[in-house]
Image (cartoon, grey):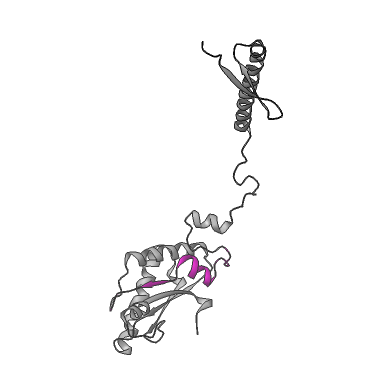
Amino acid sequence: MQSPARLPIQDGNGTFTVLSLNTRRFQRIMPMLNFSRNLKFAAAILLIALAGCTPRPDVGEDVPPVASSTKDQSAMSGVGTFDSGITAGSLRDLTVNVGDTVYFDYEKSELSDSDRATLQRQAAWLQKYAQVNVTIQGNCDERGTREYNLALGALRASAVKSYLVSLGVSASRIETISFGRERPVCTESTETCWARNRRAVTVPSSAQAS
C-alpha cells in the first residue's frame, strides 16, 4: 500500500510541521494556504502598479529658463558685425557697421564686385546721414616711384567717387586725395602686405587724419 503524500508547512516561529495530504487537518487549512498565496500575489501586483504610477520628475524642471541676450539673438539672425553701441553717423559707425575701405589689384584702379558691394553700403549710409561729407583717400603699395604712386592713388580715389556719385551721392559732398605710397598700413615687403596697402578709404571730413 502506497503511503499518503506529505506536505511540510512552516509556521510563524519557523517550525516545520509535516501533514499528510489526506488528513482532515490538511483539508481544513488548504483554503487558508490558497488565500495566503493569492494575497501575496495580489500584493505583488499592487506594488508593481504603484511603481509604474509614480511620477518621474522632468529633467531640469527646477532650473529656471535662461533669457537670450540681444547679442545672442543678433548672432543667430545673421546680423554680422553690426554694433548698435556705436554713435550713428560717426567714423566708427562707417568703419565697423558699413565698411570704409575698398582694395585694388596691382597697378589697377578698377573696382571689383566686392568693392561695389561695399560702396553701395557707403552710398546708403551717406544718403541716410546727409549732413556728412567725406574724403576718399587713395593709397598704393611701395613699388614704383613716388610720382607714379601719387597718380595711381588719385585714380583709385576718383574711381570710388565716381561710383558713389552714380549711386546718388552728391559730388559736392565728396573730395579726393592721394597719399600714394606714403601711408602704408603694413610695412613688410610681401604680397599680403602690399595687397592691404592698395586701397581707397572713405573718411568723414571732420575725422580725417592730419
Q: Is residue 91 magenta?
A: yes
The image shows a total of numbered marks equal to: 0
Horizontal side, residue 132 vs residue 33: left or right: left
User: Left or right: 106 with respect to 9?
Assistant: left
Tell me the residue at 52%/68% (across/down). 93
Q: Quadrant of residue 53?
A: top right
Q: Quadrant of residue 9?
A: top right
Considering only vertical position in the picture, is 55 above or below 167? above
State whether residue 25 is above or below residue 98: above
Q: Nearer the viewer, residue 196 or 160?
A: 196
Q: Position of residue 25 (x, y in %)?
A: 67, 13
Image: magenta residue range = 84-106
Q: Position of residue 168 (x, y in %)?
A: 42, 62
Query: What residue is rendered at 59% in x and 20% in y?
Result: 7
**Vertical order, 78 against 109 (above or below):** above
Q: Nearer the viewer, residue 77 or 105?
A: 77
Q: Nearer the viewer, residue 176 or 119?
A: 119
9 magenta-colored: no
Residue 186 x, y percent position in the rendering: 40, 82
Residue 107 in the image, given as x and y percentages of width and height? 28, 79
In the image: residue 90, left or right of residue 118: right
